[in-house]
């Protein structure tokens, strides 16, 4: 009986020691997490359109974001609201005090000027308004002839689903082919006209868009220094003639030369 009692006491003692050991380890882990894993440095890579501080502020967006381990786990394992102007991002710990953020920004497709707020309204490949600002971003076409009474940042452009789809189809196709114009103007018939310096390109409907863009890519280098309108609106698989109408001033210059 005495041996049995001693054995039980020893077993309880061992269990208490194990529990105490676990508590000590947990306490040390918590201490390390709260004292060592503090965000002191943030490195941002891949940002072109937005300043590093803007990305940093968007990522460190709650009261616990001072803790680097928390931020790392938050964006690795937990569903969080997406940063509106970022397509994807990878967050890693360079060391316990340094966060490394690699961002893949959403491509900006174009912008409209909204006179009611005196701002440029930038939209991405999904038609989402990513920015309202005074700045003009290089290699981004201005969209003319499309009006909005009101826009909400991080929501879709309110220009009608059909028109928005057509606009995004056109801008994405032009961007893929390195044919970003200075502006895209929509006229009465809602058919786009592209402007490249002194050259305008009348696209007509978006039927045969791929073929029209391919033809434009081949013809555009030949129009360097010229002034006039390239007509692609009547291009079909059967009617492949493409006309370039020089402006009157361009015609006069040619006669003088």
Image (cartoon, rainbow, N blue to C red):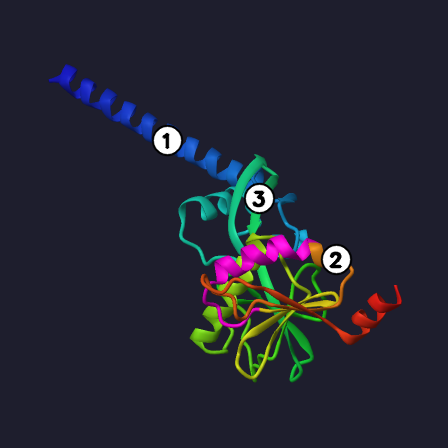
Residue stretch in magenta: 203-221
C-alpha gap between disc 2 and disc 1: 75 Å
Q: Is residue 136 above or below residue 83?
A: below
Residue where numbered disc 1 is placed: 22
- Give percent across and percent down for residue 104: 55, 49
- Which label number is shown at residue 102? 3
Please say whether residue 218 is one of the residues in the magenta stretch. yes
Residue 31, visible in the rendered structure: yes
Above or below, 182 against 221 in this view is below
Q: Considering only vertical position in the picture, is 243 above or below 43?
A: below
Cα–Cα span, label 3 and label 2: 38 Å
Of tags 3 and 2, the one toward the viewer is: 2
Residue at the left extreme of this rendering: 1
Residue projecting furthest to the top? 3
Instruction: Give the residue at mark 2.
Output: 224
Pointers 1 and 3 in contact (CB under 8 A)? Answer: no
């Amino acid at each position: 009986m005495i041996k049995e009692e001693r054995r039980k006491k020893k077993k309880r003692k061992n269990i208490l020691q194990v529990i105490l050991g676990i508590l000590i380890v947990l306490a040390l882990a918590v201490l390390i997490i709260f004292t060592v894993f503090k965000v002191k440095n943030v490195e941002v890579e891949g940002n072109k359109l937005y300043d590093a501080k803007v990305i940093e502020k968007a990522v460190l967006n709650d009261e616990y974001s001072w803790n680097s381990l928390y931020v790392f786990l938050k964006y690795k394992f937990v569903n969080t609201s997406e940063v509106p102007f970022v397509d994807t991002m990878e967050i890693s710990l360079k060391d316990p005090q340094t966060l490394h953020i690699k961002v893949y920004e959403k491509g900006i497709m174009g912008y409209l000027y909204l006179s009611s707020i005196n701002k440029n309204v930038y939209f991405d490949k999904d038609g989402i308004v990513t920015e309202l600002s005074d700045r003009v971003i290089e290699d981004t076409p201005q969209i003319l002839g499309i009006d909005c009474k009101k826009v909400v940042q991080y929501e879709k452009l309110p220009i009608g689903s059909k028109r928005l789809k057509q606009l995004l189809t056109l801008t994405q196709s032009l961007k893929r082919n390195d044919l970003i114009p200075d502006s895209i103007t929509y006229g009465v018939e809602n058919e786009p006209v592209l402007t490249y310096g002194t050259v305008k390109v009348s696209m007509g409907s978006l039927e045969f868009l791929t073929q029209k863009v391919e033809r434009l890519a081949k013809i555009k280098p030949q129009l360097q220094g010229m002034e006039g309108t390239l007509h692609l609106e009547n291009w079909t698989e059967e009617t492949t003639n493409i006309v370039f109408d020089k402006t009157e001033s361009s015609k006069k210059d040619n006669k003088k030369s």
